[in-house]
Image: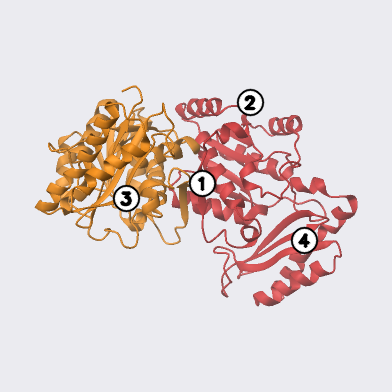
Chain colours: A red, B orange
Amino acid sequence: MHLLRTLHDMRGWQHLEKGAGRSIGFVPTMGYLHEGHLTLCQRARAENDRVVASIFVNPLQFGPSEDLSRYPRDEAGDLLRLEAVGVDAVFLPLPEQMYPPGFSTTVEVADLTDTLCGGNRPGHFRGVTTVVSTLFHLVGPDRAYFGLKDYQQWLVIRRMVRDLAMEVEIIGVPTVREPDGLAMSSRNAYLSPQARKAARVLSRALSEARALFEAGERSPLALRNQLLEVLGREPMADAEYAEVVDAETLTPPASGRPFLLALAVRIQGTRLIDNMVLEPSS
Amino acid sequence: MHLLRTLHDMRGWQHLEKGAGRSIGFVPTMGYLHEGHLTLCQRARAENDRVVASIFVNPLQFGPSEDLSRYPRDEAGDLLRLEAVGVDAVFLPLPEQMYPPGFSTTVEVADLTDTLCGGNRPGHFRGVTTVVSTLFHLVGPDRAYFGLKDYQQWLVIRRMVRDLAMEVEIIGVPTVREPDGLAMSSRNAYLSPQARKAARVLSRALSEARALFEAGERSPLALRNQLLEVLGREPMADAEYAEVVDAETLTPPASGRPFLLALAVRIQGTRLIDNMVLEPSS
């Protein structure tokens, strides 16, 4: 497995592989890898000649009061995990390379970023689209893989790629969960045993709202109330948002269109998100 | 010469040429081509295996009260001119292809765009960087050519390319002028014979400020006053700005660094720009 620590090395690897006519699958990450990330790598492995993962804790996508400085890191462990799933190269740039002096360019998607995590984390998606754009230029992937746990991020990146005519296929991969339903996340490492137990409330709320939907309920308001009701039963859970929106536009849903149920919940200060798409045919 | 009218055709051409290992030089234009544009094409012709020009009057870079609807067009004449200088392909997309329904992404450079044309045309450079970014993805050029008449645009695009790690060399080509000194511009077509004569004041102001500089004057304020003094002598000239700034950062200049003299002047409603760089060694 190649370790690429500079922009120059990353570009060189890209040129070599593309020059040889090989397809590149790309998995951008912030490290501290879990089964969710490794599932993305396995999917990339199956669909491309070469797989590159990046590990970059992107300062641009953290707000001033967020957890940038204490975001968990484990480079040695991450490299072992990536090697085990057959990743060919890992790109590990330093922030001062990605954001050199005088850096002043941003890539921004409007509308889709106004709501949910975008509404609660101003500038977050601008940081994401800017860094992903830069990474795409450096890596030159044919396909890039994103976890659907970050559903809004996947929509936003898909929109950016379409709008700016970037030639990369954006693939959303279903959320990987712990046995008790908790969506895998690097931030789960912050949870105390008690908070870890309370965190099950996110997937439970989604399941109970789905049960209601499957029983015939089609009112977004009733589904949202169900989410809030289940979250309300967990004293440690502090809901940042619980929304039912159109799964394509993230605006108020129209009947007959897929619904997105989306949650952001703080458990003892740790911000967790989860979501579920409900198809009208189901 | 290939006429490429869809994004699909443009991408297909790019793949064919790159697949064959050929380098691509790119000249983005808004059409109504003059000697300035053709000089860019000739330079691209000399430095690349293939040359592609685009003709796209980009609505995003025009303000609501600007001249989008009456911007001059001459597609047939443009194609003859491009063919005559050996351009291999012309990309002529429609606005509805470049900006499909739901389009909501922008690429923006801060700081460099706060002043000069950026200060007077809000959103203009955001429109430029967004469309140039999209065009770069579609064309995949090794080198792209921009006229230095639009000096600030050249700086902004260079910054964007560096920041987002786009793999294209940005080449600034010296302004081409009419025999009497007027910088070539598609907007010169708007000028009445009387206004055309008055328009010589821009290059004259720059020349007189340079003469002062060459005589030893190093005060930005004195040079700026010289610009304003010459512009003031022409009753038809209405200065939008006349500035002396650092030629790299566009901020107030420090001694020993190259100065940019930059002008935007309205002559009977037609907005003309021109500039000159003064090197401290000269």
| Chain identifier of the residue bearing label 3 in the image | B
Mark 2 and mark 4 lie on one chain; the one further toward the N terminus is 2
Q: Nearer the viewer, mark 2 or mark 1?
A: 1
Residue at image location 66% in from the left, 59% down from the top:
A120
* Numbered disc 4: secondary structure: helix
- The residue under label 2 is A3
| Mark 3: secondary structure | loop
The answer to whether tags 2 and 4 share a subunit is yes
Q: Residue A191 location, x and y as percent?
A: 84, 50
Calculate the distance from the C-alpha at mark 2 to the C-alpha at mark 4.
37 Å
Do marks 3 and 1 both belong to one polypeptide chain? no
Q: Nearer the viewer, mark 1 or mark 4?
A: 1
Name the quadrant of the C terminus of chain A.
Answer: bottom right
Residue under label 4: A202
Q: Which residue is tagged 1?
A: A106
Structural distance between the alpha carbons of marks 3 and 2: 39 Å
Q: For the N terminus of chain A, which image quadrant?
A: top right
